[in-house]
Image (spheres, rainbow, N blue to C red):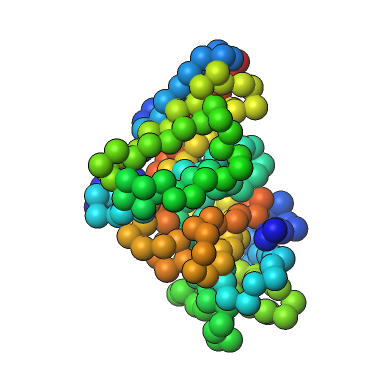
Amino acid sequence: DTGVSQDPRHKITKRGQNVTFRCDPISEHNRLYWYRQTLGQGPEFLTYFQNEAQLEKSRLLSDRFSAERPKGSFSTLEIQRTEQGDSAMYLCASSPQGASNSPLHFGNGTRLTVT
Amino acid sequence: AQTVTQSQPEMSVQEAETVTLSCTYDTSESDYYLFWYKQPPSRQMILVIRQEAYKQQNATENRFSVNFQKAAKSFSLKISDSQLGDAAMYFCAYITQGGSEKLVFGKGTKLTVNP
């Protein structure tokens, strides 16, 4: 169990650029989650995958955001045409069962700064 | 919509003493789960304790225990014999049963442990 890995740890980008983040979950976990955490706030749910299927999306996930999980392994989160309001910590988590039945295992997050 | 409120942005405790962190939530559901997650500085968020709403007995995990008051929609965390390693952000979270995989988090309480 090597834990949930996220890459990169930090990303600084200029407004209008596209960015992509990667998450590698714990290998036997079939459920994967993306959350966003801004300063002074708790994590906010963005989206959820069971294997390769994206089963739930938050209204926070605007058209500029897209997430994929090809082959049910790693996941990517892409933000197009970044805005300053996108600056946040993006957290990935995985779980072997649903979030109500087993703890979410979080990664260290990717901190995005949009200038 | 479900909401989780943590009214104490910051708390402090002396090492070896006991501290209680408060959490209230709002829901119309009858079946749900409540959690306390801990986020140490620059480290991954981890689950501290979990409570099923249908269980009247309060959950305990070593030095951590909860006071779950379903009618009052209150879910406080008690940390006994506080240790320096307990210093962290603590987030209260809620999820409904058998539906959405969305964990709803509070804004968090920053706990400082003084030696």
Measuring from the top left, give residue A61's x and y in whole percent.
Answer: 56, 37
Q: Is B109 left, or right, of A102 in this rendering?
A: right
Image quarter hosting the C terminus of chain A: top right
Measuring from the top left, give residue B98's x and y in whole percent.
Answer: 49, 69
Measuring from the top left, give residue A97's x and y in whole percent.
Answer: 36, 63
Task: Give the residue at x 44% y 50%.
Answer: A55
Task: Give the residue at x 51% y 14%.
Answer: A17
Q: Is residue A90 visible?
A: yes
Task: Give the residue at x 51% y 64%.
Answer: B99
Q: Is residue B83 visible?
A: no
Please give the count of numbered marks on the rendered protein.
0
Relative to B10, is B83 above or below?
below
Query: Is B102 or B38 nearer to us in this picture?
Result: B102
Q: Is A74 left, or right, of B75 in this rendering?
A: left
Furthest toward the bottom, the residue is B56
Q: Is A29 left, or right, of B109 in this rendering?
A: left
Query: Is B41 or B36 nearer to us in this picture?
Result: B36
Task: Give the residue at x 56% y 82%.
Answer: B54
Measuring from the top left, give residue A45's x and y in whole percent.
Answer: 55, 47
State which quadrant residue B90 falls in: bottom right
Relative to B102, is B96 above or below?
below
